[in-house]
Amino acid sequence: MAKLLIVDDEEKIREMIGKYASHEGHDCVLASNGKEALELFKKDDFDLVVLDVMMPEMDGYETLKKMKEIKDVPCIFLTALGQEYDRIYGFDIGAEDYVTKPFSLKELMMRIKVILKRENKTTSKIIVDGLVVDEDAHTVIVDGERIDMANKEYELLLYLLKNMGNALTRQSIISKVWGYEYDSDDRTLDTHMKLLRKDLGEYGNYITTIRGVGYRFEKEI
């Protein structure tokens, strides 16, 4: 997934976007104004910026112009402005898209997905707090430390992460990780899940057992 910078002077809006995007698997950093966003932008590498237009001190237009001087990163403007001139000006200075307030979070996520795909900014990495799984490199990093993980535990983790927030039945997990023809009982899955939780340290707590159903990976928020 991608790393997003969410900038809005309204706390409720930026936290709402951050929460929703995190559940979609993105790594989100929040900023309350343009100056704070610029400082974060200088220090980190973001795949996309969601930027409010109307902010005190430094508005979204000025913030984006300064960001473009540092690095060319796609941006979606959030705005209550409906004038054609405002939209054209935003596109002129480098915005990829506009979303007018009030907006649908689902629609915003779809626009983000389209832009990331177009910009080829999608990554093989899945990042959840200090847990980083790189599918291309087949590696797992926990709080900066690489973990030597058995293949079955790795496949279990990848399946859970790709379905983050969803309840997965025992049978679906066994079918995906061991194969449809594999004849296994619950103890095999439970044993590997126990080992996986141990490998993940504190992030093992993100794996929830759903009694009578199976498991779910859910980030604590």
Image (spheres, rainbow, N blue to C red):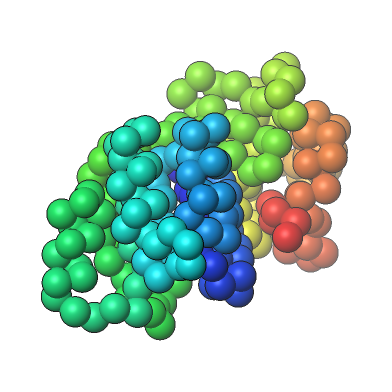
- Quarter of image, res 131: top right
Nearest to the observer: residue 84 or residue 179: 84
Is residue 100 depicted above or below 61 in this figure? below
Residue 130 lies, in percent from the top left, at 70, 36
Is residue 170 depicted above or below 17 in this figure? above
Residue shown at 35%/79% (left/top)? 80
Across the whole image, how many numbered discs are drawn on residues?
0
Residue shown at 76%/49% (left/top)? 207
Hey, which residue is sitting farthest front in the picture? 57
**Which corner quadrant holds the C terminus?**
bottom right
Q: Is residue 72 visible?
A: yes
Residue shown at 84%/40% (left/top)? 202
Residue 124 lies, in percent from the top left, at 45, 32
Residue 31 lies, in percent from the top left, at 57, 55
- In the figure, is residue 81 to the left or right of 6? left
Nearest to the observer: residue 100 or residue 152: 100
Residue 60 lies, in percent from the top left, at 38, 60
- In the figure, is residue 189 to the left or right of 179? right
- Quarter of image, res 67: top left
Q: Is residue 162 visible?
A: no
Is residue 93 depicted above or below 125 in this figure? below
Nearest to the observer: residue 105 or residue 196: 105
- In the figure, is residue 28 to the left or right of 196? left
- In the figure, is residue 42 to the left or right of 99? right
- Quarter of image, res 81: bottom left
Residue shown at 30%/47% (left/top)? 65
